[in-house]
Image: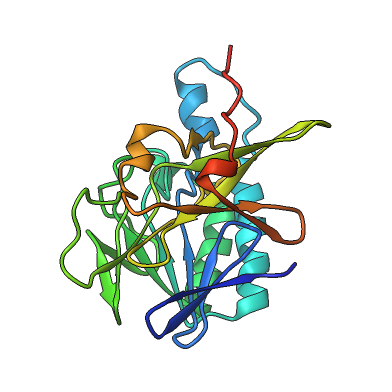
Amino acid sequence: MTAAPIHFRNERLMLDPSGAAFWPSKRVLIIADLHFEKATSFAANGSLLPPYDTRATLERLNRLVRLYRPSKLIALGDSFHDSKAPARLAKDDRARLEAMGREAQFIWVAGNHDAAPHDLPGQCVAEHREGPFVFRHQALSRLAPREIEISGHYHPKACIESRAKRVSRACFVSDAVSRLILPAFGAFTGGLDVRDQAIFRLFPRGLRVFMLGQEQLYSFALEQLGRLPEVA
């Protein structure tokens, strides 16, 4: 897979087609919205889903750790689908997370689903600041001067329409000046149209999306996008 560079001042981030971002100069891997144990959460409420979402997400994450060899991994909130999810982790899944925690320092940013701390390796924080970046779960409506924000929460998706077909994919969203929103990394996650006001209002100077492909990213300006199909 081919990662795409994006620059914020003097720092370069690599946007990976998996939906993660990598900060090479600091060897930091960044992911958002893992939503571990979403299926077991739904099962407790009577909606039965195959309980393999955590395992599938961990397998994808483990491949990235093998590829990039990060010294630090920042998870931008909603890493777990609810506050009790860490206790529902299967023994093998917990062991895999603990093994990754021995290879890279985990920074768990609190999200709206998983605000409570847990006993897995790493540090639980409300937000994390490093270099010119502030890492938080949900983008703020206003940023401090010269602040560069990297966030998740919205699970952004974009749609491209052509004569042949309509393609909808998860995507990164950025203005390449002060904001980057990551797509959801978890196996069982939906998405919000980047044209939705909740996302659009955060980019008054315009935005570009980087849609996830099998092997590379595809970049489009807002005016090139169609609308996501409505879910019945």
Residue 44 appears anywhere in the view: yes
Rendered view: 101 above or below 89? below
Question: 62 or 133: nearer the eye?
Answer: 133
Give me the residue at 42% from left, 39% from top: 81
- Percent across and percent down for residue 162 are 75, 35
Tell whether 95 sits left or right of 26. right
Count of labels shown?
0
Considering every residue shown, the one lying at the far left of the view is 144
Considering every residue shown, the one lying at the far top of the view is 232
Question: 144 or 203: nearer the eye?
Answer: 203
- Percent across and percent down for residue 13 are 50, 75
Question: 218 or 204: nearer the eye?
Answer: 204
- Percent across and percent down for residue 185 are 55, 51
Rendered view: 145 above or below 209? below
Residue 83 appears anywhere in the view: no
Rendered view: 228 above or below 45? below
Give me the residue at 44% from left, 53% from top: 207
- The colour scheme of the drawn protein is rainbow
- Percent across and percent down for residue 225 are 58, 39
Tell whether 202 sits left or right of 11. left
